[in-house]
Image (cartoon, rainbow, N blue to C red):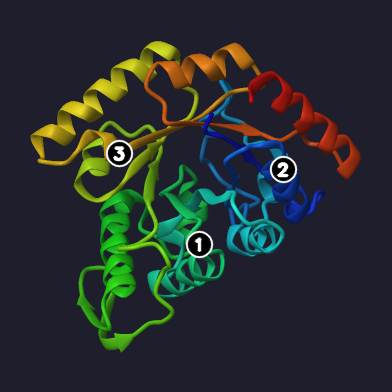
Amino acid sequence: MSIGIIIPLPAYHLDPAFLAEKAENLGFDSIWCGEHPILPVHSTSRFPGSPDGVIPWTYAHFVDPFMALARASGATKRIKLGTAITLITERNPLILAKESATLDHFSGGRLILGIGTGWHKEETEIMGGDFDHRWTQAKEAVDVLKKLWTNDAVEHHGKYYDFPPIKSYPKPKQQPHPPILLGGMAPNVLKRVVAYADGWLPNRLTIDEVKQKRHELDVLAEGAGRDPSTLTITVHAPGFDPSLVKSYLKNGASRVTLRAPSVTSEKAAGQELEKFAKALL
């Protein structure tokens, strides 16, 4: 089964190298790391994952995903290395192209680049993003990434990014580039996936929604001349429910991710991952 493990929050209590090696040895297919580079002290943004909109305190305790996944890469040989998600409108795409290509190169082609635009207006703006037009900015950033990953000399003149001919190496190991998955539940997300990505990273879906969205994605792909089988859906499962995970995979999900337990010792984390594996793999 294609089941991945997400690094828990606070994200620095456990070494990602340990988590990745343990997950690989147990048979999980991927390890994932999310991103919030900062958490503004004062904001009016509502957290979409809870009814009251209160932002969890743990959201100030993310690590840098590329540093964490580099540690995971060095301790493993097979497991995929995923960002779920990296906030593309809060990063300079020239630096992101370098970081992601370097990780893919040294890991032997294991990066999955999950991207999103976030829900926190103040964070996005502090980091230099255009929150009100964040998906327009994200599309241009993806265009820049693809150019830098696949060409020798590149120039770009757009609304958000403008630069003369430049070179950027190394190139990714995966050709033409690592898979790009779009996160979020925006109304047009599936159209965007078909237009310029390789998959979708939704959160908090029911089984019926997985079925429906898989069908919608297939129809959109066929209409655009893309092979639906090349577009993946990676669903984040809420909590640990083996029957739900298996149902996701039977009803249209390509992969399911589970958040590793928020414990502070490697022994406890290892025991929990062993419990996951026994029930699922």
Circle nearer the viewer, 1 or 2? 2
Q: How far apart are marks 1 and 2 (CA)?
A: 40 Å
Residue 201, quarter of the rendered image:
top left
At mark 1, the secondary structure is helix
Query: Can residue 125 be seen?
Result: yes
Amino acid at the residue labelled 1: Ile
Residue 221, quarter of the rendered image:
top left
Circle 1 sits on which residue? 126
**Along the line of sight, which residue is nearer the eye, 135 or 178?**
178
Q: Quadrant of the N terminus?
A: top right
Name above or below for residue 131 compared with residue 176.
above
Q: Distance between the residues labelled 1 and 3?
A: 33 Å
Amino acid at the residue labelled 2: Asn
- Rendering coords of residue 110 (x, y %): 51, 56
Name above or below for residue 2 compared with residue 106.
above
**Along the line of sight, which residue is nearer the eye, 98 or 54?**
98
So how many labels did they put on this image? 3
Circle 3 sits on which residue? 231
**Along the line of sight, which residue is nearer the eye, 87 or 195?**
195
Structural crowding at the residue carrying mark 1, measured as other residues with C-alpha within 10 Å and reported as few (<14), some (14–19) or many (≥20): few
First along the sequence among labels 3 and 2: 2
At mark 3, the secondary structure is loop
Query: Can residue 8 be seen?
Result: no
Q: Which mark is residue 25?
A: 2
- Rendering coords of residue 166 (x, y %): 30, 87
Residue at the image position 52 percent from the left and 54 percent from the top: 123
